[in-house]
């Protein structure tokens, strides 16, 4: 007998050798118990998920209300554009820098 | 089909009595298939119950009642696969390579001592085939058993797994080759099985 045929034969013997199990009396009630258990679990998950979504929505609305409220002061610094801010900048560092060059040059007037 | 389409549609609409009827009709077939797929009588009922629970929660995804049986087979093979994977992780069971002389002698002795007992021989065949199937992945094991032992056609397997015919053939061929190789290496150890064949 060919090896393949032997394997086929073995597998068919295997099928015959496997017992045909009968479902016990508790089989179907067991299925329903598991369905119920999972349903409870899914239900709990849905409740938590809904709670989480509600809390997130409330937080969003609260932040939006704070943002839009007339009492919230807007920092004037951030209302300027970059060029406006540069134009207005008369910070002392610029002067100090010029001053340093002035000294390094041995007291000569550069400008 | 063991049930009519209306019953499936009723179950799909949430009719628990209809679902109960489906369980009653199909449980024997599913238990038999799982028994052959997992080879552990003590866990068969548990896996079969899981199949029906999955069926209950996935019935609404069933496109048409006509494909109910492939769908149920798919759930069955998935549940069996999950079980085998869990068991493999848990126990790291002996592979065919580890099918030691001791293992075989034990089975041989068992069968030899009680040659009159077909039950013992059947148990030896089961053990031997399970050891052979350790050579392939759990997924291929389920696929191979579905084809070779359950007798499903390529077309049915295509419906169940959603694979193309060629891909299915290649996978089955490779799995079968591996099992065949393992069988070739160890067939000398199972003379009692082949002699039983002649009876």
Image: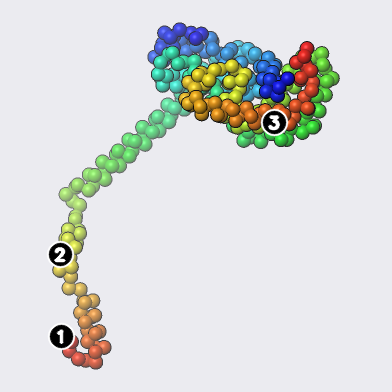
Residue at 23 percent across and 47 percent down: it is A66
Disc nearest the viewer among 2 and 3: 3
Expressed as whole percent of the image width and height from the top left, the position of residue B174 reads 60, 30
Q: Chain of mark 1?
A: A
Residue ID for mark 1: A111
**Residue B182 circle label:** 3
Residue at 41 percent across and 8 percent down: it is B6
Q: Chain of mark 2?
A: A
Q: How many numbered discs, if any?
A: 3
For marks 1 and 2, give the CA distance.
26 Å
Q: In which quadrant will I find the C terminus of chain B?
A: top right
Q: Is residue B148 above or below residue A67?
A: above
Q: Chain of mark 3?
A: B
Q: Counting residues from the N terminus, which is met first, the one under dot 1 or under dot 2?
A: 2
**Residue A84 circle label:** 2
Judged left or right of residue A40, residue B43 is right
Label 3's element?
A: helix
| Foreground pick, B4 / A22 | B4
**Residue A103 circle label:** none
Quick one: label 1, few (<14), some, or many (20+) residues within 10 Å? few
Residue at 83 percent across and 20 percent down: it is B112
Expressed as whole percent of the image width and height from the top left, the position of residue B53 reads 50, 21
Expressed as whole percent of the image width and height from the top left, the position of residue A8 reads 67, 20
The single residue placed furthest to the right in the displayed view is B113
Q: Check whether the beta carbons of the residues at disc 2 and disc 3 lie within 8 A of each other.
A: no
- Residue B73 in view, yes or no: no
Q: Check whether the beta carbons of the residues at disc 1 and disc 2 lie within 8 A of each other.
A: no
For marks 1 and 3, give the CA distance.
95 Å
């Amino acid at each position: 007998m060919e090896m393949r045929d032997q394997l086929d034969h073995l597998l068919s013997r295997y099928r015959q050798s496997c017992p045909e199990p009968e479902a016990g009396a508790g089989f179907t009630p067991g299925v329903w118990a598991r369905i119920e258990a999972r349903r409870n679990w899914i239900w709990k998950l849905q409740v938590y998920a809904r709670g989480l979504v509600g809390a997130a929505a409330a937080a969003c609305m609260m932040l939006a209300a704070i943002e839009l409220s007339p009492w919230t002061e807007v920092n004037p610094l951030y209302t300027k554009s970059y060029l406006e801010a540069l134009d207005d900048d008369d910070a002392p560092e610029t002067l100090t820098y010029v001053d340093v060059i002035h000294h390094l040059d041995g007291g000569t007037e550069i400008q | 089909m063991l049930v009519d389409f209306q019953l499936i549609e009723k179950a799909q609409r949430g009719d628990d009595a209809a679902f109960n009827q489906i369980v009653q009709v199909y449980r024997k077939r599913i238990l038999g298939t799982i028994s052959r797929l997992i080879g552990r009588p003590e866990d068969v009922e548990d896996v079969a119950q899981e199949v029906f629970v999955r069926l209950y929660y996935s019935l609404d995804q069933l496109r048409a009642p006509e494909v109910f049986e492939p769908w149920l087979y798919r759930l069955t093979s998935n549940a069996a696969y999950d079980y085998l994977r869990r068991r493999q992780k848990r126990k790291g069971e002996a592979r065919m390579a580890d099918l030691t002389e001791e293992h075989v002698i034990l089975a041989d002795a068992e069968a030899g001592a009680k040659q009159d007992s077909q039950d013992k021989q059947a148990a030896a065949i089961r053990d031997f085939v399970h050891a052979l199937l350790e050579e392939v992945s759990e997924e291929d094991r389920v696929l191979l058993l579905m084809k070779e032992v359950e007798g499903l056609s390529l077309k049915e397997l295509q419906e169940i797994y959603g694979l193309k015919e060629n891909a299915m053939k290649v996978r089955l061929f490779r799995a079968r080759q591996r099992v065949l190789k393992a069988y070739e290496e160890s067939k000398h150890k199972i003379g009692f099985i082949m002699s039983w064949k002649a009876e």
